[in-house]
Image (cartoon, rainbow, N blue to C red):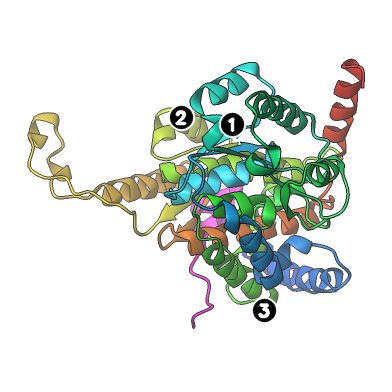
Amino acid sequence: MADAPTISLDFNNLLADAVGEHGLTATDIASQDARIKQYRAQLASERAHGQHAYMGLADDADMLESVLRAIQPRLGRFKHLVLLGIGGSALGLKALVQALRPNGAELHVVDNTDPTVFASVRAAIDLRHSLFVPVSKSGGTIETVAALGYFATELNKAGLALSEHVFAVTDPENGYLRAFADKHEIATADIPPAVGGRFSVLSAAGLAPAALLNVDVAALLEGASRTAKASITGASDWPARLGLIAADMCLQYGKTSLVVMPYSSRMEYVSDWFTQLWDESLGKDGKGQTAIPAVGATDQHAQLQLFLEGPNDKLILFIRLAKHTPDLKLGEFEWDSFGAGYLQGKSLGEIINAQQAGTAQACAERQRPNATLNLPGLDASTLGELLMGLEIATTYAGLALIVNPYDQPAVEAGKRISRKMLGG
């Protein structure tokens, strides 16, 4: 079936048969089955009333057409694309670009008010060949406003028109950035008002700059659609299962941290993106589960000691690629001199997958519950499937934890205090 999901979740290593008292029982799984059906019906009803809007992005043909039409006049014109944004307005794009390695303009991200970030980007670019893309629904985010103000001043000093070198992604009607874009005749793409920043990677917030960098955004949405449809129909609903597993392991078994560990350096930023998604969505009212980013095999030599012999308060989620592209085979060398004769003839993909499997087994033997998301490979379609699935998993975890996954009251409080300290 063409629309069947390609990602699967293996959670055998978090069952009681594998990790004893730290694992889910048959009763726990049966409870999840019933709640998934209940929550699925709840989500369907709420979506009909405009909630959970991100779940509809994958099948929004008008949105995709609008994004592609908006970016078309700027394709291939610039050597540098400078993304001005923070949080969900930057992490999603960084994840897309690192994972898919498009051959478009060079990406620079200004996602901090640290002056060294501004200075390093300014030194690396030629303004004449640069397109600046501020991404902010409200347009009032201090980090984005500071970056836009600095680089707009630089463009003005160089005698370069803002309308030629700025492309804004913002609310379709309201906000400071919308007003600024209209005033200066800056082209824009629209972020749907009902979609929050950390759930916006598959909206114009992520798709517009990604498309400008030659990412196949249609394939991203195609993959995302597979996950969304399967989650609605109940076929291969790994996102719902993952969300409830994480919540139950937190509430019932004290696993207050969720380690996200892809065995691919191309997904390091996926871990960072997910950490924001999970932590900011679920950390409320004294509840939540702390996401910890890691990358295999690198962090086997950094964090794994803690995971295996530190506090048993973690659930580990591995992400495994069946096929690594490119893959390289190890040829003749003095392997035996290093006690590594077993490596000859092996591909690096085989090696890193063996390291993942070995780590997962070692965790289970030490009663450290873990699960593995199995991906066939890493192309735009599979990445879209993964990102949508992780967003849906976050929503299900929010339902189980009884928190609103779409607001961030504590973050907003910090922003208000910062503005007051600066005289705003």
Question: Between disc 1 and disc 3, whose residue precedes?
Answer: 3
Residue corresponding to mark 2? 305
Location of residue 30 (image quadrant):
bottom right
Secondary structure under the numbered disc 1 in the rendered image: loop
Q: How many marks?
A: 3
Residue corresponding to mark 3? 233
**Is 40 placed above or below 196 here?**
below
The one nearer the camera, 71 or 40, is 71
Judge depth for marks 1 and 2 and give the one in front: 2
Q: Residue at x 43, y 53 (%)?
A: 320
The one nearer the camera, 225 or 246, is 225
| Three-letter code for the amino acid on which mark 2 is drawn | Gln
Residue 16 in the image, given as x and y percentages of width and height: 56, 55
For label 3, count other residues whose C-alpha is less than 10 Å away and answer few (under 14), some (14-19) or many (20+): few
How far separated are the C-alphas under marks 1 and 2?
11 Å
The one nearer the camera, 260 or 205, is 205
Question: Between disc 2 and disc 3, whose residue precedes?
Answer: 3
Residue corresponding to mark 1? 311
Q: Which mark is residue 147?
A: none
Residue 393 in the image, given as x and y percentages of width and height: 67, 58
Residue 367 in the image, given as x and y percentages of width and height: 51, 44
How far separated are the C-alphas under marks 1 and 3?
39 Å
| Three-letter code for the amino acid on which mark 1 is drawn | Pro
Q: Residue at x 71, y 52 (%)?
A: 199
Which contiguous range is marked in magenta?
A: 1-25
| Three-letter code for the amino acid on which mark 3 is drawn | Thr
Quadrant placement of the C terminus: top right
